[in-house]
Image (tube, rainbow, N blue to C red):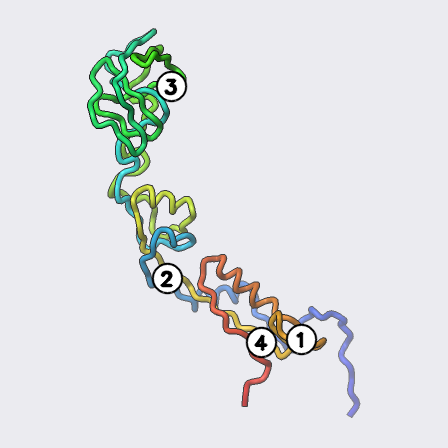
Amino acid sequence: MTLIPPPLRNDCFAMPQGAHWTPVDVALALLRDRLTSVTGTETVAVSDAAGRILAAAARAARSHPPHANTAVDGYAFSQAGIGDGPQTLFLTQGRAAAGAPYRGTVPPGHAIRVLTGASLPAGTDTVVLQEDTATDAASIVFHGPLKRGANTRKAGEDMQAGTDILPAGRHLTAADLGTLTAAGVASVDVRKRLRVAVLSTGDELRDAGELATDANIYDANRPMLLSVIARWGYDPVDLGRVGDSQPA
């Protein structure tokens, strides 16, 4: 029998004779048909929830801000009676600061020193910027008019207690964790992570750090793929490597 060589192709990427490659669209259709969604859920602390998928809408545990507060450093007073032109108000002793509210009531015709983030004291509804005032420690002067509520934030202006603040299916970001925490949410229900395993095959493979001859190569794909899987938010499973032949 005389052997006849096939036509020369000289192309290592050409499809071998008799081989059949599944088209990409067919392969994707098969994956969509055979894969199922991860439906299990678990509860995790908000601090550990970055990259997770919300299984249910997250609701605000309390309003944010919880009370009307001041958006600037300045002086708080009742806007009633404030008109155009120069205004003079007597200073009430004390001040309101974030975490240190003023416990009394500011009388009409008076103002009180307030710092950014402080709850508005009783008897006040408006704040004038510190930079827009002059004071002698007994009173302040400034130019009107100021609209009611100027330089303040309403209670619940960002989020209302009991309302949904993030929808189910949300891929949680670092900013979302800040939103949840600001609303008093300590834990959330999320989908369980998808587990993805990586197995390397080949007699020629060695792990970095192992003794390798000229006939060996280091397994670079496995650590790379495991890292990508973890960065995508899945649980990587390292199955190690196996040779090309099944053990007897």
**Of label 1 and label 2, which has the lower sequence position?**
2
187 left or right of 18 in image: left
Q: Where does label 2 land, which residue? A: 192
Q: Secondary structure at mark 3?
A: helix
Secondary structure at badge 4 equals: strand
Question: Gap in Å between the C-alphas at discs 3 and 1?
Answer: 72 Å
What is the spatial separation of the Cα atoms under label 1 and label 4, in whole angstroms?
Answer: 16 Å
Which disc, if any, is residue 130? 3
Q: Nearer the viewer, residue 39 or 108?
A: 108
Near mark 1 (Cα within 10 A), the count class, few <14, some 14-19 or many ≥20, is some
Question: Of marks 1 and 4, which one's residue comes earlier in the chain?
Answer: 4
**Along the polypeptide, which appears first: circle 3 or circle 1?**
3
Residue located beneath label 4 in the image: 201
Mark 1 or 4: in front is 1
Compute the Cα span from label 3 to label 4: 71 Å
Residue ID at (27%, 22%): 94
Q: CA distance from mark 2 to mark 4?
A: 29 Å
Number of marks in the image?
A: 4
Query: Which one is nearer the viewer's eye here, 158 or 14?
Result: 158
Task: Indicate the position of residue 109 as horizontal and vertical percent values.
Answer: 23, 13
For the N terminus, the image quarter is bottom right
- Disc 3 + disc 1, Cβ < 8 Å: no
